[in-house]
Amino acid sequence: MVNAKALWESLERKYKTEDAGSKKFVVGKFLDFKMVDSKTVISQVQEFQLILHDIHAEGMVLGESFQVAALIEKLPPTWKDFKNYLKHKRKEMKLEDLIVRLRIEEDNRQSEKKAGNYHQEAKANVVEQAPMERPIATASESTASYQETIQRGDPAASALILATPRYKSDQRALREKLEI
């Protein structure tokens, strides 16, 4: 006759081995997950959250900063610039905040696409030489114009300031204004 303890141990052996297999399966799903351009990012974020939920349900713990970094890394190829922007943020971000930013970015991309302003970025740099119509500005004029650009918050000009190494004070002021 089989007693309760022996029965319990046999059940435990059977389901413990299956438990280890399901953990490996969930981890495999997490590692293999990659976002694609053919689906919306938000729907793929929801899939990612389900995988994270499964990992948590299996008793495994992933820190929030790891989850945020993993989600950023799994963004689709056309989101490369936004991905780099997020990677270079100095402040630590919560998963919830990242999802809000992704939703806003996706909405902006969809509205640009509908308006017809959406275009893929060129993969080559083009340098053209324009005729000089006015003399080159002095250093003080340049600095004043940079300061005006910082105050206006023009994104294209701001990117130029950030890329120009000789105006460190302007770069610092712009970073503070943009909270980079």
Image (tube, grey):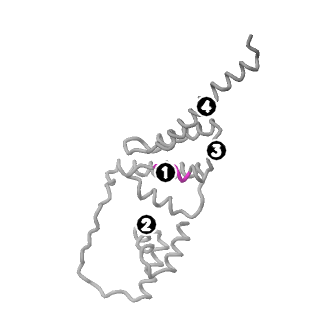
Question: Which sits earlier in the primary sequence, circle 2 or circle 1?
Answer: 1
Which amino acid type corresponds to the residue marked 2 in the rendered image?
Pro
Coordinates of residue 151 in the picture (x, y in percent)? 49, 73
Q: Outermost residue toward the top?
A: 1
Question: Which sits earlier in the primary sequence, circle 2 or circle 3?
Answer: 3
Coordinates of residue 169 in the picture (x, y in percent)? 52, 80
Q: Which dot, 4 or 3, sits closer to the camera?
A: 4
Q: What is the secondary structure assignment of the residue under circle 4?
A: helix
On the rendered structure, is 133 left or right of 90? left
Q: Are marks 4 and 2 in contact (CB under 8 Å)?
A: no
Question: Which sits earlier in the primary sequence, circle 4 or circle 2?
Answer: 4
Q: CA distance from mark 2 to mark 3?
A: 39 Å
Q: Residues within 10 Å of mark 2 (few under 14, many from 20)?
A: few
Question: Which sits earlier in the primary sequence, circle 4 or circle 3?
Answer: 4
Write down the residue under mark 1: 104
Q: CA distance from mark 4 to mark 1?
A: 39 Å
Find residue 176 and name its label. Answer: none
State the image quarter where residue 127 is shown.
Answer: bottom left
Question: Which sits earlier in the primary sequence, circle 3 or circle 1?
Answer: 3
